[in-house]
Structure formats: C-alpha cells, structure tokens
Amino acid sequence: MLSSIVFLPALGALAILLLPRGRDQLVRHTALAFTFAAFVLSLVLFALFDRGVSGPQFIEKYHWIPQLSVRYFLGVDGLSLPMVILTAMLGFLSVIVSWGIRQRVREYFIWLLLLETGVLGVFTALDLILFFLFWEVELIPMFMLISVWGYAPPLGRREYSAMKFLIFTILGSSFMLVGILTVYFSTGTFDMIELARTGIPHGVLPLAMIFFFFLLGFVIKLPVFPLHTWLPDAHTDAPTAVSVMLAGVLLKMGGYGILRINLSIFPGQAQQYSGFLATVAVISILYGAVVTVRQRDLKRLIAYSSVSHMGFVLLGVAALKEVSLTGAALQMFTHGTITGLLFVLTGLMYDKAHNRQIPELGGLAHYMPVIASGFAVAGLAALGLPSMSGFVAELLVFLGAFPIWRATTIAAVFGIVLGAGYILWMLERAFFGPPNVRYAHAGDAGLWEAVPMVVLIAVIMGVGLYPAVITDVINSAIGPLAGRLG
C-alpha cells in the first residue's frame, strides 16, 4: 500500500507523458484522478493504522544494494502518517488549484506529480540512502515549477528565486550526505529503525559533528534564521499550487528530519544542545513575526509568517518532552493546512484582482465575500484562535516547553501577539473598510475554485475541535521517542 501511495503520482506523470499533445483537459483530469487515488489510499492507511503500536507499520523491505546494506525500506508510524495524509491531500488540492494553468500544461502537471512522489517518499523511507534519494528528487520539480511557471519580471524574479532555492537546499543536502556516510562507516547500516534502537556507540567523527551535519540540512529546509532567505523569494515567485506544496509539506521535511534522525538516533547530542535549539527557535519566532509586520506583498507576508511558525516546531523539539514534541509534530500538520489555505486564497484573490500589494487593496469583502470569509478563517487559525487547529498545537508546545525553558517560552509568546497584530492588520487593510471601486468587477470564487478552501477549512476546524483524531496517532510514536530522550 505504501508503494502505491508514493508512486501513484509518478505513475500519473508517466501517463500524462504518454498522452497526445493538445489534450490539456485530459491531462488535468488524469492528474486529478491519480492524486485523488493517492489521497484516498492515505485515508485508508489512516483508518487501518493501529494506534496501540509504537513501531513502523505497513512495512515494505527489500534488498536493493546488498553489498552496501542499502534496502528499499518503507514504513509509517505516528510521526510520518499525518505527513503522508497532509502531502496526499495537498497534492490533490494543488491539482484543482492549477486548473487554470494554460502554459505548457502537460509539463506542468508532470513536474507537480513528481514533486508529490518525492515528498511522499521522504515521509515513508526508513533507509537513510532511500530517504536522501527522495529528498533530492523533489529539487528538480520544484526548480522547474518556479523557474518556468513562476512570476516573471516585472512581477517577480522566477529564475533567481528558483536558483536560490536550489543552492540553499543543495548546501544542506551536502552536509546531510556527509552525515549519512559517517553514520554508515560508524555502524555498517542505513536502517533508521535499527539506528534509533541501538544508537551509535562510536563514530568515525565526533557524534556532535555528525548531529550538526544532519541538523544543518534540516534547519535550512525548515527554515530558521538566518538560513531562511530563500523562502520568501521562492514563495513570492512560485505559482499558487507550488506555494501550497512548499509551505504545506516541503518545509515540514525539515522538522520531520529533526524528529526522525536528530532526536531518534542522537538523543544524547539532542539533550546536550537543546539550549542552542531553543535559542535559535525563539530568534526565528520573533524575527519572523517582526519582519512579517512590515511586508506589503501578501505572499511575502505569509512566507515570513511561516518562518515564525516553524520556530514553534523547533521550540517544541528543544524541550524534549512528550507534550512539547507532540505539539511540534501537530504544528507541522496544522501549519500545512493553515498556510496552504492562505496561499490558495491568495492565488484566488490575485486571479480576480491582479494585485497582491496590501496597501493598494481595501474593501475586497464587498466584492469577493467568499474569499474574504476564507481569509478570515485562515487568519484566525494562524493567530491561534481557540477551536481551530493552530491553537491546539501552539498550546501543547508552550505547555511542554515552559517548565524547561521558561524565559525562552515567555519570549516566544510575544510571537503570538505579533502574529495577531499582522494578521488582523492585513485583514483590515485588504478586505475591510471602504470598498475600492478599482475591484468592483473582480468577481468571487466559483464553485470549483472553492473546493480546496472548503476542504482545508473543514480539516482546520475538525482538528481544532477534536485534536485527538491526530494526536492519538502522533503519540504512538512520540511516547517512545520521549522515553529515549529521558
């Protein structure tokens, strides 16, 4: 089942490649069918998942390169299953969001589906080489999607942003590859489950150095200050669906990697450098929030807010307690849905109004009430309003982190205050107040365009009102991990 979920989008890309040219509508329907099938299978996986089992389930393990002990090893546990569902859901919704693509339609959907396969592979791979292979697979589709279908001058700098994304990510991947090789030379295995069980008694390099090799690769992807500068540019110039995937799941690869590798395989080093992680987390939270307040472009505002919100993931990790780690894992899921919704709505609004500059908007709720209502829900979820999923995740992070890092946690709370400020100020300037007659004929979201918005709002509200639907799954993996961390 896992191989089917991972490779269905790639199979869809192959099917699209074999379609005759000029059949753009058939291309769209093919992409929709394959991503929907992967999403349905992920829900079946969720229904069959045994929450009482702490280890990986639905395991697929085959020899791949026996001479090097490299295996095709897939599995999911409570940490990876929510990410698989999130990726499959956003991949399906991204196809709907991309329905209006007119330029090189076949190539666009091929790259979009290959991107989904790469990300799904990262969240299911349990062999370090296979993990690294999937990690690198997503680079080429993302580069192509931004550089070809992104915003060109004078609206954007798509080639520059795509290259900047590639350089930063390859830099992190280089350090991660060194970490993987040193782990193999130290233990003779790439098996992530075995490494988490036995640890690394003696490394060919100091374990702290190997720990930071992995950490650097992951925090670039997360991203944290000062390694975040690729993110606003990539978001600003990427097409809407690509921003949804980038904010929704690609950033979460960094947080997932820290939990899966840095904490699981290097628990001693995680404890030793937890203070460093907490400091970096609070700097990212406050810096991201302060810079977000000053943004005029709506996409850059959401991008910088992601830097701040990913800081909460790192803060939860730094506390190393079950409650905070559960909050960090839940924050990755909830942020994916909330920020994905914000980018969906931003793309819709731009398609109608042809403007993303917040000071030049105003009163849009008079002309596009559905989009404005969606923005209000997404904004309130982003600032952590109770009854919405963002509140639950941030509350768990704070409850777990406060007994360990009191001053740091108190400082991080100001990020929530600033978040409320920039979200409410953005809503007031862009959607409320006197109507701007410039947008009187902009129009509102149609029925098909509203589907992604409705699905994401339902998930945000559902998890906010009944978080156990996700936390019960997460706890099956976080409990044993927190036990190893002491």
Image (tube, rainbow, N blue to C red):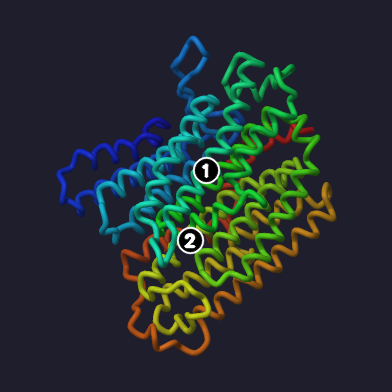
Dot 1 or dot 2, earlier in sequence: 1
Residues at marks 1 and 2, CA–CA distance in whole angstroms: 17 Å
**Residue ID at (65%, 65%):** 291
Q: Please state if 193 lies on the left or on the right of 62 as rendered.
A: right
> Which x, y percent locates residue 230?
55, 52
Q: Quadrant of residue 12?
A: top left
Assess disc 2: are there few (<14), some (14-19) or many (≥20) residues with their C-alpha within 10 Å of its C-alpha. Answer: many
What amino acid is found at the position of numbered circle 2 in the picture? Thr
Does residue 458 appear anywhere in the picture? no
> Which x, y percent locates residue 173?
55, 35
Assess disc 1: are there few (<14), some (14-19) or many (≥20) residues with their C-alpha within 10 Å of its C-alpha. Answer: few
Q: Which residue is more in the foreground, 450 or 307?
A: 307
> Which x, y percent locates residue 151?
39, 61
| Residue marked by disc 2 | 236
Furthest-top residue in view? 67
Does residue 482 appear anywhere in the picture? yes
Q: Nearer the viewer, mark 1 or mark 2?
A: 1
User: Is 300 located above or below residue 55 in the figure?
Assistant: below
**Residue ID at (64%, 21%):** 182
Quadrant of the snapshot with the C terminus: top right
Q: Quadrant of residue 41?
A: top left
Q: Please state if 13 lies on the left or on the right of 422 as rendered.
A: left
Q: Please state if 69 lies on the left or on the right of 12 as rendered.
A: right
What amino acid is found at the position of numbered circle 1 in the picture? Ile
Q: Which residue is more in the foreground, 89 or 63?
A: 63
| Residue marked by disc 1 | 167
> Which x, y percent locates residue 181?
59, 22
Quadrant of the snapshot with the N terminus: top left
Report the label total.
2
Q: Which residue is more in the foreground, 439 or 409?
A: 439
Q: Quadrant of residue 268?
A: top right
SS type, badge 2: helix
